[in-house]
Amino acid sequence: MKIRALTGNEAMAEAMRQINPDVVAAYPITPATEVVQIFASFVANGLVDTEFIPVESEHSALSACIGAAAAGARVITSTSSQGLALMHEVLFIAAGLRAPIVICEVNRSISSPINIHCDHSDTMGSREAGWVQIYAEDAQEAYDLTIQAIKIAEEIFLPVMVSTDGFIISHCMQRVEVMEDKEVQEIIGVHRSPYSLFDKPITIGPLDLQDYFFEHKRQQIEVMNQSLPVIEKVMSEFNARFNRTYSIFKTYKIEDAEQVVVLCGSTCGTARVAIDKMREKGIKVGLVKLHIIRPFPHKELIELLKSFKLITVLDRSDTMSTMGGPIYVELRSAMYGCSQHPTIVDYIYGLGGRDIDVEQIMEVLLNGEEIIKQKKVATPIGYIGLRE
């Protein structure tokens, strides 16, 4: 184990180097450019055996990845924002073909207006494409989860994207524990692929009309439905080997809490500081950090959250549905059938990279205390740090 100072982009590139994929096809986009730029230097210096394919667009990048995966290769790419949006058509194809591709995704707002900073509108906008979605809080998690992602993808034969917050994680340097190359190779194991076109030629992506399309989609749905235990298994094996504590979600000071905050990404660190300060005031609040958004762990969250008086969700994107942010919408739907039915409120924050600080989260938590006391929600969907 080595201690290094790495940005989130450097951490993801280092994980890719240690994975040593067969193929990386990519097109640069801010703030994810450095991931493949750094990796390209590894290729040029002979540190990996990877075939690096520079292409003319993100759509082409993922298309090339699918072709490589269909030939039986271990494949990784990276993108962000408009790049992920340009891949949108091909995301569904990768998932439908059960291609175990990994995307190192750096969260950035989707235009318009044009913005290069962080929110979660890019990945949340692609959450129905059939990819496992994993969210990292910091550079250490970006490194660790990229390594776990390739193992997860090749265990369930579904593509996986690992998301980090643009600039907040991607360009900020942190202390990262880096494993030895041999250790990474041992834990990811020999590449597993559903395809071996050279040994057994088959047709990929055939026309599939009314007679079988529904059945094939149902198979894909069922794989996603059954993937959580596999994800948990991979995380547990990683934890045991490298003394980590990964799980589909992580809790903080919820044991005696009346109000719990649910969110994902880099803001979890800010929320923990706010919770500590609230605890100093004698206010019982806790945190649930979501690592996995797809598949959404609804059964596990129902069991965890059903007894709290108030659930406060923080969303870094909006569904444009009048119903709030995506985590709120999905969690509220999941909790609908719960007999105890806790109150749930949502706050949209940080769109386009706007900062959120400890004091703002404390204000949200104080609002939650008033809701608990009054037993009444005046506005279920609010906004943090917005000029109105």
Image (cartoon, rainbow, N blue to C red):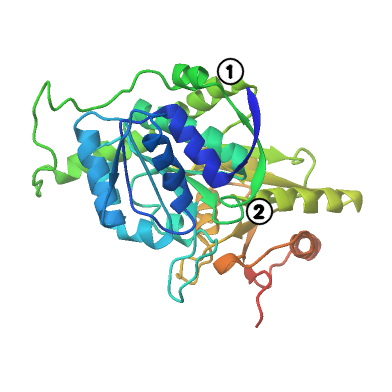
**Which residue: 13% across, 28% down?**
197
Kindly report the distance in space between the C-alpha atoms of the residues bearing marks 1 and 2. 28 Å
Image height of 69 relative to 289, above or below: above
Q: Is residue 223 left or right of residue 29?
A: left
Measured as percent of width and height from the top left, residue 157 is found at: 31, 31
Q: As shown in the figure, which amino acid type bears the numbered disc 1?
A: Arg
| Whether residue 309 is visible | no
- Residue contact at pointers 1 and 2, CB within 8 angstroms: no
Which residue in the protein does label 2 denote?
Answer: 267
**Which residue: 48% across, 31% down?**
147
Res 215 quadrant in image: top left
Measured as percent of width and height from the top left, residue 213 is found at: 15, 45
- Quadrant containing the N terminus in the rendered view: top right
Image height of 299 relative to 359, above or below: above
Measured as percent of width and height from the top left, residue 114 is found at: 46, 73
| Upstream in sequence: badge 1 or badge 2 | 1
Dot 2 falls on a residue whose secondary structure is helix
In this view, the residue in front, 76 or 49, is 49
Q: As shown in the figure, which amino acid type bears the numbered disc 2?
A: Thr
Dot 1 falls on a residue whose secondary structure is helix
Q: How many marks?
A: 2
| Whether residue 212 is visible | yes
**Which residue: 10% across, 46% down?**
208
Which mark is on residue 241? Answer: 1
Q: Is residue 51 left or right of residue 249?
A: left
Q: Is residue 385 left or right of residue 109?
A: right
In this view, the residue in front, 175 or 363, is 175
Which residue appears farthest toward the bottom when viewing the image? 388
In this view, the residue in front, 197 or 385, is 197
